[in-house]
Image (spheres, helix red, strand yellow):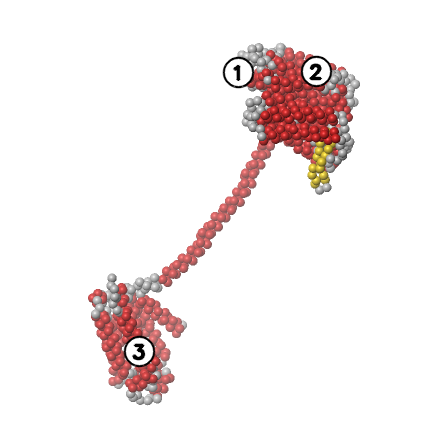
Amino acid sequence: MSMLSSFLLISAGLFCIGIFIVLSKRNAIQILIGIELMINAAILNLVAFGKYDNLANSGQVFALFAIVLAAAAVAVALAIILNVYRQYKTIDPAKVERLKD
Amino acid sequence: METTLSHTDIITIQLAIAAVAAPFVVFLLNFFLVPKRSKVSGMLSGAAIGASLVLALLIFFRVWNQPALHVQQVWFTIGNTQIRLGIWLNNLSVLMLLLVSAIALPVHIYSIAYMKGDERYTRYFTYLSFFCFAMLALVVMDNLLLLYAFWELVGFASYLLIGFWFTREKAVQANKKAFIMNRIGDIALLTGIMLVYTHYHTFDLVTLFGAHPIKTTREVWVTIAGLCFLMGAIAKSAQFPLHTWLPDAMEGPTSVSALIHAATMVAAGIFLLGRVYPIFDSTVLTTIAVIGCFTAFMAATIALTQTDLKRILAYSTISQLGYMMMAMGIGAYSSALFHLATHAFFKCLLFLAAGVIIHEMQHLKHKHHLQIDTQDINNMGGLRKIMPVTFITCCVAALALIGFPLTAGCLSKDGILIQGFAWAEGKSWAYSIIPIGAVLTSLLTAFYIGRLMFKVFFGESRLEGISTDSEPEAHEENPLLYLPMILLALGSLFPLFSLDPLKFENAWIVKGFAGFAGKAESAGELIPLLISALSVGVVFIAYTVYVKQKLQWLKFKGVLFNISYNQWYIDSFYNGVIVKAMVGLSRAVAWFDTYVIDGVVKLVAGIGLVLSRVSAWIDKYLIDGFLNALTYFVKQTGNFIRGFQTGRVQGYLFTMLIIVLALYILKTFI
Amino acid sequence: MSINQILFYVMGFTALASALVVAASKNLVRSVFMFFVTLFALAGLYVFALADFVAVTQIVIYVGGVLVLMLFAFMLSNKETLNNLQSKGSKFITINNMAALLVATLFMIILVNAIIKAQPDHIGWIQRSLRSDTPRKDNMGNIGVNLMTRYLLPFEVISIVVMMALIGSVHLSRKEEHKL
């Protein structure tokens, strides 16, 4: 197995673990961590392919941008979690179901 | 107006119209304006009929034995046919005009006093005026259609007057019976009129039966038409077999019986026969004679045993009408009309007297608190002491009925008998039954009227505890009651009709109808004298039986008595067979209507109901069920899908991922 | 097996294992700290992909910024929140976990399937790049030049996005003026 394939497999594994965390945790911050994990898996994927682009370094540039976006997302998400906590007095997403039909 | 008439003729026609219209005007006045118990109604009616009498006299002297007057006008047109109406004044018309008004006037005067105190006084005179109008119009019409119309109106007036006291059950049944029996005759009359029109295409009496009457040919239809006219006359004049209504018609007031059922309406049948006389061929004439003779004999036998005063007089009327019909049948046209006129006088008088007697009996009943039938002659007796005027006038009338010499009745009856024998002469022996029957009937007449006179006026009172010597003078105090009776009594004597008391041919009536007169027998003097003698003998027998109470072998038992007393069981036969058959038939039809026809209707309705229930069930369970199922399905689908909106974010994400996975799996592996 | 490969596999394994611990741990603090480890391992992996600048950036921004932010966020929050951390469930396999596990496994299978099918070794441009092996010098400089020339627009846009995120999060988390 080549290095590229290994990179891709690791990236896939992290991504799936991230999905598992997002789907099964009861804490909003843990879900946030899961999201971060997914984003990191994607960044790993980008960087793995970017190894073969010496000219434009597109993979790495894209990875930089993704890191920045991930940070922005975390900031905004924390602000949202704070508001949700203020409103519902809990950060368990299963408890926030006022939009239920 | 077809031909130009002279001035006097026009006046005569106008007088005739006035004479007919006067009672009609009074009828309208009484009907609409006069209050219920006012005396004005009686005076108005009396005045109207008095005016009619005066006018009739005037017309009579202008038209009698003059050429007949006839005026016409077009009434309506159907297609190419014109129907005309008008007035025909010949000897017969003016005689009847005079007779009707002359009899009606005394009856009106008598009624003013007789009906005093009655609840519906005005209505009585309304009906009486209506009847006079209809009868007077009947005799002057020249058109078969209008004759029929007034014939019906006369019958209708009779119905109204018989049932005048309509609160009594018997009166209501009697007037129904009279009307229905008259109806049977009217149907026959209408058939006859239609037959005549079909063959001659005219309703005009003058054309058909006037100065140049139609010739009857030996055709069947002529006989049938003649029989139809005869049937009409039988019903109206109460001959066998349609005679049973007349005794029951005595439920009306006695003055009504006097006017209508003795003198005028029942004479309308004879008048009709006189009008259409030329249409009768020999078969029909023989039939008329047979029926007349049989009726006369039968009615006389029934009158022998009746106990109700008015019923005896009713059967006497039937019998005398039989005489008149028989006279018509044997060709003695003038004698029939002569007898009509004289009979009117003395029969009317007898009825008026009966009214006074019944009033007196009611007076006795109230005074002594008895419970008796005031019309039963077995409760009367010795009344000559308290009612002398009534007694004397009744005697005159009775003698006229018997045919005693010096009375007018004698002349007319003699004429019939003599002409009867002359008619049977030269024919087979069977034909002579008729004149012999007439003779027997006249003897029976003598007996029953003698019985009536003796039982009512002679002897002592049959009521217990009352002696007629001590009773005061009765209702005769009222001149309005006994003046008419005296006038009629005078009319029953011979001078009114003939200046010669012995020969009937010299009566002016007979001379007036000489064109139709039959033969006269040579031995004409003998028969009437013989009969008069026999009648006197019979009266004496009656005297012995009823006054002296001897000769009791004429017992009240036996088959003949029962037959006579029960009116030959004819009435019972009609009630038991014919009436029951009709009622049964109508019940059957009613049953059919209720169960079959209504059953079908109800069945259809039931089917409709069942169908509606079925469709309601279908609507409720199938259609609504289908819709309900749809909505249920939609609701359940909605509920199911709604379940996906849990409000939990992780659930949403889970669903999204599952779908993506499913898509990918489907795309790559399938 | 050269030392490169061994090191590479160790890094990879560390990343995965720490990620698993993050997933399996119920304690929030523990999971955050294990995430630290994951991020460090990832940075090591980036080095193996010849992306040194990205690795450093990852450590600086991600570990030093984002993770510290999260630590601050829940450390400085209410007591109830901290108390809520350790109470939930004792079992690993619950209903929710089963579904998530299923989905994750399926995804794994599909991704692996896609990777195998894609045959990344045989993609055209990768092989060309391998053959024309121009040596890499001044990786960072190259990135800088590319950022300023080729990727200028995304660069500016990203800066605006960051500014929006900043303003937004500040606004969202402000205190209410009038308390009832």
Q: Position of residue B343 (x, y in %)?
A: 68, 21
The amino acid beneath tag 3 is: Ser
Q: Position of residue B369 (x, y in %)?
A: 52, 16
Q: Do the residues at pointers 2 and 1 share their chain?
A: yes
The amino acid beneath tag 1 is: Lys
Mark 3 residue crowding within 10 angstroms, few (<14) / some (14–19) / many (20+): some
State the image quarter where residue A45 is shown. bottom left
Q: CA distance from mark 2 to mark 1?
A: 38 Å
Q: Which residue is mark 1?
A: B367
Give the chain of mark 2. Answer: B
Give the chain of mark 3. Answer: C
State the image quarter where residue B205 is shown. top right
Answer above or below: position of A64 versus B302.
below
Q: Which residue is mark 2?
A: B404
Q: Which residue is mark 3?
A: C159
Q: Residue at x 76, y 34 (%)?
A: B3
Q: Position of residue B80 (x, y in %)?
A: 72, 41
Give the secondary structure at mark 3.
Answer: helix
Give the chain of mark 1. Answer: B
Compared across the picture, whether B566 is left or right of C37 comes to: right
